[in-house]
Amino acid sequence: MRVAVIRFPGSNCDLDTVFVLRKVIGVKADLVWHKNFKGDYDAVILPGGFSYGDYLRAGIIAAHSPAMKYVKEMAREGLPVLGICNGFQILIEAGLLPGALIRNTTLKFICKWVFLKVKTTRTAFSNLMKREQVLKMPIAHNEGRYFIDEKGLRELMENDQIVFTYVDGEGNETPNANPNGSVANIAGVCNLEGNVVGLMPHPERASEAILSPYGSDDGKLLFLSMKNFLERWM
Amino acid sequence: MPRYIVEVLIENKKTIRDPEGETICRELINKGGYDSIKSVRVGKLLRMEVEGSSEEEVKELVTRMCNDLRIYNPVVHSYRVEIRGITR
């Protein structure tokens, strides 16, 4: 099992993600420069950061990288594709996930720990979680306000494509628990098939209890789910 | 071949809130005493120099480029292409 973490100019969560995959999850992981990525992996992760300085729009320039042709092929083949934070923005701009990620309504860069609710366990990155389970993970972003029109939101709900929502400690999707103004408190979505997932929170920063002020290693569940998905279904 | 100055203006669709514009209007402009200014929308302006043989041709090319490369995000943005003159 080989997992690629793609580094774009301006990626800055790439090493954390590789570390978690190798040392916490125990899978072979390569850090791959985007121009060298040819898709010959079992899974691929687009890490967080500020690819191309967020010029024009977060994720848009990286979405045109030659690497994305191979990411799209892997997505089509049903292999696990994960986008974290800026990686989520890239997947959206590349058309692999629906919607848009725009400036937080607060106009502030938000860096804090939040609660998330698991909305579906059918994806390559949530199959070891329980529906309605509440997870604690950090967010760190300026353009994390998920937007989709009403028709699009209906389709997301009907097709079970909402993976994570922002909630309070009791698991309620309240306006106060919504840090950035996202439609329907959405923090993460998947494609129709469930093998492509994007989320704004950082699971790689919540994969070892000792590194969390709350002792949370909930983020590990995403990567363990990916491993489980590959072992069982691929 | 003439070189045209072309501007592409990208802004949030009317139905999508623009908190940056709202804040500039409320906190800077209105609090600064300019009460008659009732709303502000912030956008992004791309000014280009484009070679072409006519305004129509250049406008068509830039419009095609904007859609082809997703210069704006159709989910949230509207855009406008305007010819602003010729440099030579």
Image (cartoon, coloured by chain):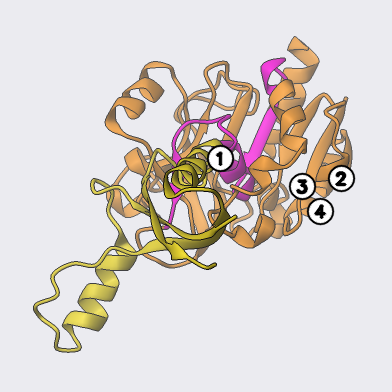
Q: Quick one: label 2 or label 4, which is nearer the N terminus?
A: 4
Helix, strand, or loop for circle 2? strand
Residue A143 locus on image (x, y percent): 48, 55
The numbered disc on residue B43 is none
Asked if the residue under mark 4 is in contact with the one under mark 3, i.e. CB atoms within 8 Å, the reply is: yes
Foreground: disc 2 or disc 4 = 2
The numbered disc on residue A93 is 1
The residue pinned by badge 3 equals A17
The numbered disc on residue A15 is 4
Q: Is residue A181 magenta?
A: no
Helix, strand, or loop for circle 4? helix
The residue pinned by badge 2 equals A31
Give the vertical position of B20 relative to A73 (above or below). below
Chain B: give its colour. yellow
Q: How many marks?
A: 4
Farthest-out residue, left: B36
- Marks 2 & 4 on one chain: yes
